[in-house]
Amino acid sequence: MNVIKVKDQVAGGQAAFKLIKQAIEAGAQVLGLATGSSPETLYQEMVNSDLDFSNMLAFNLDEYVGLAADNEQSYHYFMQEHLFKFKPFKATYIENGLAKDLEAEVERYEQLLQAHTIDVQILGIGVNGHIGFNEPGTSFDSLTHVTNLTESTIQANKRFFNDISEVPTKALTMGIKSILQSKQIILLAYGKAKAPIIKRLLSGEVTEEVPASALQKHPNVTIIIDEEAASLL
């Protein structure tokens, strides 16, 4: 894995944007996108750029179960507000958290992924090592699926809601195998809270108890971290 250490999150967004631009210039057509605070500066770089995404496809990692697309805490809403309303794509795909048949929905989404290989996948990482919403113990062979969120993930996400009772307990997410099928992966991590898991990701064993450790098996991964996230290396 290639590691890029940057001063702060702004510099991290610039570094990630440079990699995406290079990939597009080399012919990339499909982006895999993440939500949360980590990719926000990257999306700002994309919005401020003169790059044209109108012939590209975008697939999102995950979506909460039970939130409508226009809910301000849904990932549909996040992507619209941070990127899509400024930079239109040919098509954007995000799991439907209100699907009546969730198993049919994840099967539909996985079929789309199989038909359109992701050229560059953006990831964040949870303090427990989750990527997407693949929590510790998720099989490395997992495809898009419904998952129960761990208590640590619910606690980490409660800051976005008025009350912890409002935080969804289930999500739809690309599986680890789905993610690893991407040609190139860029993982972003910022802040001191991420330092222990970054150390474990880079120097620990490959184990399903640390979902992100599966990235050690991928041939083209770049980890972009700020000084605080790199503080234990």
Image (tube, rainbow, N blue to C red):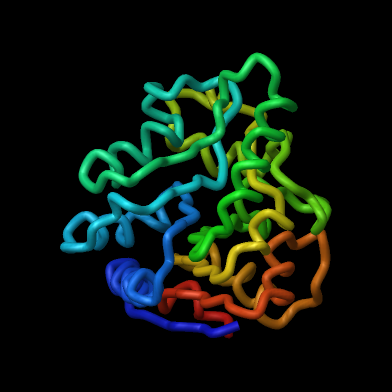
Q: 139 left or right of 213?
A: right
Q: Can residue 195 be seen in this view?
A: yes
Q: In which quarter of the image is residue 71?
A: top left
Q: Quadrant of the N terminus?
A: bottom right
Q: Is residue 8 visible?
A: no
The residue depicted at 33 percent of the width and 61 percent of the height is 42
The residue depicted at 55 percent of the width and 27 percent of the height is 96
Please provide percent x and percent y for residue 76.
42, 33
Please provide percent x and percent y for residue 11.
29, 74
Q: Quadrant of the C terminus?
A: bottom right
Where 176 falls versus 102 (above or below)?
below
Where 140 falls versus 80 (above or below)?
below
The residue depicted at 51 percent of the width and 22 percent of the height is 67
Tally of marks: 0
Q: 15 left or right of 169?
A: left
The residue depicted at 55 percent of the width and 44 percent of the height is 156
Which of the two residues, 104 or 166, is positioned nearer the viewer here? 104
Which of the two residues, 101 or 125, is positioned nearer the viewer here? 101
- Name of the residue lying farthest toward the top: 100
Q: Quadrant of residue 140?
A: bottom right
Which of the two residues, 22 or 40, is positioned nearer the viewer here? 22
Q: 122 left or right of 13?
A: right
Please provide percent x and percent y for residue 200.
69, 74
Please provide percent x and percent y for residue 3.
51, 83
